[in-house]
Structures are given as C-alpha cells and as structure tokens.
Image (cartoon, grey):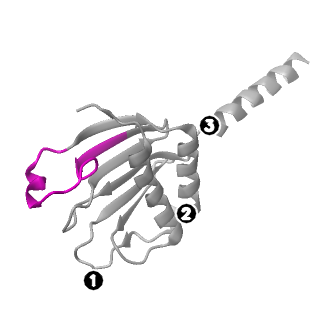
Amino acid sequence: MKYLFSLMVFLGLMSCTTSQVSKYSKIEYEVGPCFGFCPIFKITIDSGRNAVLEAEHYNFSQGEGKSDLDKPREGTFKSVISKEDYQKLTTLTDAADVKTLKDSYIDKRIMDASKSNLRVFFSDGTKKDIALSAGEKPEKLVALYTFINELKKNQKWEKVK
C-alpha cells in the first residue's frame, strides 16, 4: 500500500513539473534599420519569462533627422513577462508552426523596409531562424511577431545599461 501511495505521489509531482516545462528555451526577435525612422531593437525572452530589450534607436523616441543614428543607443532593458503574455507568446509560436516555415520571407523588390530575424530556440536544442522583411508572409507568423512588438511596448522595462 505504501508503494502504491509513493508511486501516486511521484506521478503527481512529475505531472506538475512537466506541465510547466516550455518547449521553447528562448525566443529572439531582432529588427534592423530601414530608410526612415523604424525602431531598431532586439528582444530576447527565455522560458523563465525573463526578457531583455536591446533598444538601439526609435523605440522610445521619435526620429528627428538623419543624424539620429549618431546619437547614443537607447539602452538595454529587462522585464519579466506576465504568465498570461508568455502563454500567449507560446500559443502564437505553436500556431505559427515555425519549424515548418521557410527560412526567409524577404522580398528583394522592397528595398527600403527594415529586415528582421525571428529565432526560436527549442528545448530539445534545435533552432529555427527566419529572416523577414516587407512582403507576403504566413498570417500566423505575422501574428507572432506583431505580438512580440506589442510586448516591447506594453511591458515595464527597467534600464540596466
């Protein structure tokens, strides 16, 4: 009887820990410059919901002129993403089925748009890197990186440097 009880406790504990393990170890989204005042940044979110925002230019300020790029970068910021937002992030990543997507969605005919990269690191050690720019992309991929952009705007970021 005590063996049965021990087995039930062990299985109960295992089910609790496995339900909290994310299939993603880290998600990164990096956006480069355009021929205008597009935000330039990199955001990294790990499976512990820790986020780092490396803000270069035009994230917290509006562009004024070409000399803006000569100004110091805006800084490095950190935050902890809420459980709800992290759940939505993983749900959108699941829905996009990133492993099956092409490696590049860059339209070479559109020269003035910023180029970005979405990198999804899986808990099994694999990684998917997707290059993006203006042009046609799967709707669920657009929903994913749009949500990441929203996280950049709606979190309480603490400047660390």
Residue 103: x %, y % from top left: 39, 69
Label 3 element class: helix
> Disc 1 vs disc 2: which is toward the camera?
1
Left or right: 154 as drawn, with respect to 139: left
Q: Residue at x 28, y 47 (%)?
A: 60
Q: Residue 36, how many percent across, how many down? A: 20, 66
Residue that badge 3 annotates? 20
What's the residue at 12%, 54% (across, down)? 68
The relative height of residue 137 versus residue 12 in the rendered view (above or below) is: below
Task: Answer with left or right where residue 20 lies relative to residue 48.
Answer: right
Amino acid on which the number 3 mark rests in the picture: Gln
Query: Of the residues shown, which amino acid type is indicated by label 1?
Result: Arg
Chain-order first, disc 3 or disc 2: 3
- Residue 93 in the image, given as x and y percentages of width and height: 53, 56
Earlier residue among tags 1 and 3: 3
In the drawing, what numbered circle is on residue 109? Answer: 1
> How many numbered marks have been drawn onto this rendered protein structure?
3
Q: Residue at x 25, y 60 (%)?
A: 32
- Above or below: residue 96 compared with residue 22: below
**In this view, which residue lies farthest toward the right?**
1
Answer yes or no: is residue 123 visible.
no
Which numbered marker is on residue 97?
A: 2
Give amino acid for label 2.
Asp
Q: Please provide the residue range marked out in magenta.
A: 52-73
